[in-house]
Image (tube, helix red, strand yellow):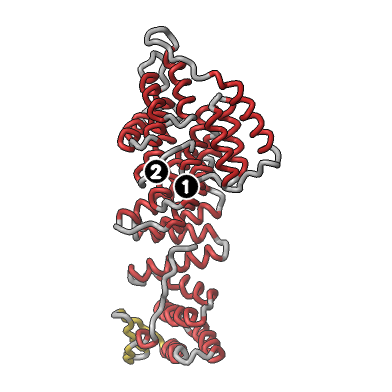
Amino acid sequence: MLQIMLALGGTTSSLSPAYAQVGIQTQIVLDGRSFALSTREARALSTLRESIPGGRHAIQDAALEAARNATDSPDARYLFAVYALEIGRQRSDTMLRAEALDILIARGIAPQVKLASYLGVRGGIAFERGDFATARQLWTRMLGMKPGDADVLANLAQVEQAQNNPKGAAELIARAIVARKASGQRAAELWYRQWLSAANQASLVSEASAAGLALVAAYPSARNWHDALVVYRQLAAPKDGLEIDWLRFSRRVGGFTKAAEYQRLAQLLEHEGVNAEAKAVLAEGLSDAILRPDESPTRDIIAEVERAMTVQAGGLPAPARPGSGGGSAAQSQAADRLFGMGRYSDAATLYRAALNGPTAESGRLNTRLGMALSAAGLGLEAQAAFRSAAAAAGSGYADLARFWLAWLAQGDAPASAAS
């Protein structure tokens, strides 16, 4: 939806000029400006102005045609455009408004405040007609007159989107949001969603992260959390443990709406040996009636998880002793199993121990530590862990940690990621 929808024109009394005969010319003062007209021009324009209040199309059409033929001078053409614009506004006549606006813009004598309005509305007409080049040119000129105007930036973003330049659209709509917030106002939810959509179309992973975070911070609805996470996962295509943790987070914020999401997470967890959590995921999907136990592949996944749980009944591996080599990996694996079983405090202890190992993956371990602490109800400690993960450059976990921080900032209520 275009943001610039300015009403132009006014009451007929505001279009009533003061006339004065000077020699063979008629001097007209309108809006504090003096216009010199020939007698023929003054007569035609007077008839046109007098046709405005009645709103009778036939009379107005005749007066418009007569004035077009009679007005030759720049002053007369300007006044013709002023009157024609008001008639076009009253009649919702886009063609007439476009004709009038082209004259008013080209003459270069309109007051600056009116010229900005003329450029805005004429750009809107061009956009609706599919004339995107003209819309861009007019709105870019308007932006030069009103630097940083949020509505103009948003309109230009729509031009870029319409011309299949989502990268340019994403940049402009992001600037519009910043400008709106700088003015002390709240940017529309539609703008944030357009930013996310443009980032998705342009396959911009970092932009999708920024847009998604901004969207859920400003409008934290279940739909927006779901869409922000889905777009990011589709673009970033996380693998292995990182994919598991993204899916865990999506489930935590209520973002699972499809059977495939429950099925995918359950299978990945089962492959990682975190079978208790896989079973809990499936149980939730069944309870929410998103999964059906008699349908494939849900039926097959349930059977796989049950078999794996039987094999794994032997218990947890013993954590390696400090300094014995490979300790961080063994401690991390044990922590993962404990997390999946809902033993979050125990899991957090082992994740902390693993972080001291010689081959510790700080991004992954701090993220999982934060997840365990959050599930254990230790929100402040969880935030500290996620901040450490967000600072782990190149780990692939930084974006996930930032989403976790955004969720916790909104008062995360659920107590368990696997219950």
Q: Position of residue 114 (x, y in %)?
A: 36, 71
Q: Nearer the viewer, residue 415 or 167?
A: 415
Q: Is residue 9 visible?
A: yes
Name the residue beneath numbered marker 2: 407
Are there few (<14), some (14-19), or many (20+) residues within 10 Å of tag 1? many
Q: CA distance from mark 2 to mark 1?
A: 9 Å
**Is there any visible trace of residue 144 in the rendered image?**
no
* Amino acid of disc 1: Trp
Q: Is residue 207 above or below residue 393?
A: below
Is 179 on the left-hand or right-hand side of 199?
left
- Residue under the point 48% across and 38% down: 419
Residue at the spot x=53%, y=48% of the render?
A: 165
Residue 155 disc label: none
Who is closer to the viewer here, 282 or 357? Answer: 282
Q: Depth check: 184 or 306 in front?
A: 306
Three-letter code, disc 2: Trp
Label 2 or label 1, whichever comes before in sequence order: 1
- Helix, strand or loop status at disc 1: helix
Q: Residue at x 43, y 12 (%)?
A: 320
Q: Residue 50 appears at what percent x and percent y?
A: 44, 92
Query: Looking at the image, how many numbered discs can be counted on the residues?
Result: 2
Dividing the picture into quadrants, the one containing residue 263 is top right
Q: Is residue 103 left or right of residue 297?
A: left
Q: Residue furthest top?
A: 324
Q: Residues within 10 Å of mark 2 (few under 14, many from 20)?
A: many
Residue 154 appears at what percent x and percent y?
Answer: 43, 56
Dot 1 corresponds to which residue?
A: 225
Secondary-structure class at tag 2 = helix
Q: Are marks 2 and 1 in contact (CB under 8 Å)?
A: yes
Please, is residue 304 above or below residue 64 in the view? above
Q: Residue 90's spot in the image, x, y percent?
A: 48, 82
